[in-house]
Image (cartoon, helix red, strand yellow):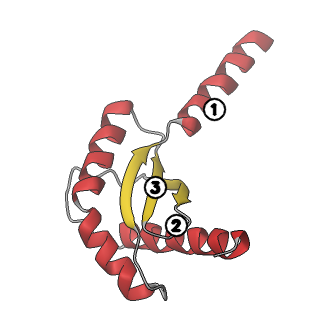
Amino acid sequence: MNEVSQKRLESHIIELISSLLMKGAVKDPRLSRFLSISNIKLAKDLSFAKVYVSTFEDEKTLEMSVSILNRASGLIQARLGKSLKTRNTPKLQFVKDVSIRDGIEVNKKIEDLQK
């Protein structure tokens, strides 16, 4: 698979997972509703995908949500398999991404320095 096709498939997977989360496919009440799929790294052979999840909430909430998503990865993968037009559905691993929170902290420090 060439690079352009892989990037297109990655963005499609992000849209599908985001849609599933918004529709409440994972029915755990501890799962944060303020999650965002920030990035995805798809293996060249489409067998594996590392999905980066972020939120502006605290670290504990993000860790719990990532844990819940990893337990529900089979369900999400099955729903992806129905929508994707690929031979294989990638095995999903959810990973926390703290870049948004780090960016907010850096901006806050810059504003504090300007005052």
Q: Choose between 22 and 37: the one closer to the eye.
A: 37
**Could you tell me residue 38's position as x and y percent?**
55, 53
The answer to whether 49 appears left or right of 4 in the picture is: left
Mark 1 or 2, nearer chain start: 2
Gap between marks 3 and 1, in whole Å?
20 Å
Q: Residue at x 35, y 73 (%)?
A: 23
* Type of amino acid at the residue the image marks with label 2: Ile
From the viewer's perspective, is the residue at label 1 or at label 2 nearer?
Answer: 2
- Residue indicated by mark 1: 103
> Looking at the image, is 83 positioned above or below residue 95?
below
In the picture provided, is 33 more to the left or to the right than 51?
left
Q: Is residue 87 visible?
A: yes
Q: Compare residues 113 and 45 and report the one nearer the observer.
A: 45
- Percent x, y for residue 11? 60, 69
Query: Would you name the residue on which mark 2 appears?
Result: 14
The reply to whether residue 25 is visible in this rendering is no
Determine crowd level at label 3: few under 14, some 14-19, many 20+ residues with C-alpha closer than 10 A: many
Mark in front: 3 vs 2: 3
